[in-house]
Amino acid sequence: MSIHNKIPFLDLVTPHAELEPELTEVFRHALSTAAFIGGPMVEEFERAFADFCEVKHSIAISSGTDALRFAIMTCGVQPGDVVVTVPHTFIATTEAISQAGAVPEQSPAGHRSRSCASLRPDGRYGRDPGTSRKARPHRD
């Protein structure tokens, strides 16, 4: 095998080729009506996605970082709280923690799982009894 043979890392063309006419039509409609920020198209998507997930409601948001931030805020994290995460995470995790007003703290990785170190029954981790865990984006 030659080093010049390239295997694509991720083929995003093939799976979307069949959907191209429908996606193009929806995209043109969104552009011509500016309905991609709120409005009927977003409401229709939220309803359809909620039905697909078999839940009562869904909320469309702009990014995965916002999804993390809202999840952290929904967990009751308050400004100044410490949120423990792992050091080998994407920057969006610590960014979302900071945007929620909390302080990101990186936990030592667990020996076996390489995820957050185990928490004690009192909700604290490690040897520092002053650090509490309010939410954790990664789980063992």
Image (tube, helix red, strand yellow):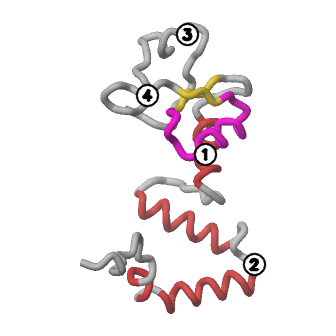
Number of residues whose C-alpha sits closer than 10 Å to that of mark 4, classed few (under 14), some (14–19) or many (20 or more) = some
- Measure how far apart labels 2 and 3 are at the Cα level: 51 Å
Q: Nearer the viewer, mark 2 or mark 1?
A: 1
- Measure how far apart labels 4 and 2 are at the Cα level: 45 Å
Q: State which tag comes first along the sequence, 3 or 4.
A: 4
Q: State which tag comes first along the sequence, 2 or 3.
A: 2
Q: State which tag comes first along the sequence, 4 or 1.
A: 1
- Measure how far apart labels 3 and 4 are at the Cα level: 15 Å
Where is mark 2, residue-wise?
34
Where is mark 3, residue-wise?
128
What amino acid is found at the position of numbered circle 3 in the picture?
Answer: Asp
- Image disc number at residue 121: none
Q: Which residues are magenta?
A: 86-103
The picture places residue 133, in percent across and down from the top left corner, at 55, 21
The structure residue drawn at horizontal position 63% and vertical position 69%, both measured from the top left corner, is: 42
What amino acid is found at the position of numbered circle 4 in the picture?
Answer: Ala
Q: Nearer the viewer, residue 76 or 92?
A: 92
Where is mark 1, residue-wise?
91
The structure residue drawn at horizontal position 71% and vertical position 76%, both measured from the top left corner, is: 35
Quadrant for residue 77, please give it. Answer: top right
Q: Secondary structure at mark 2?
A: loop
Q: Nearer the viewer, mark 2 or mark 3?
A: 3
Q: Does the segment drawn in magenta span residue 101?
A: yes
In the rendered view, does 131 fall on the left or right side of 108? right
Q: State which tag comes first along the sequence, 2 or 1.
A: 2
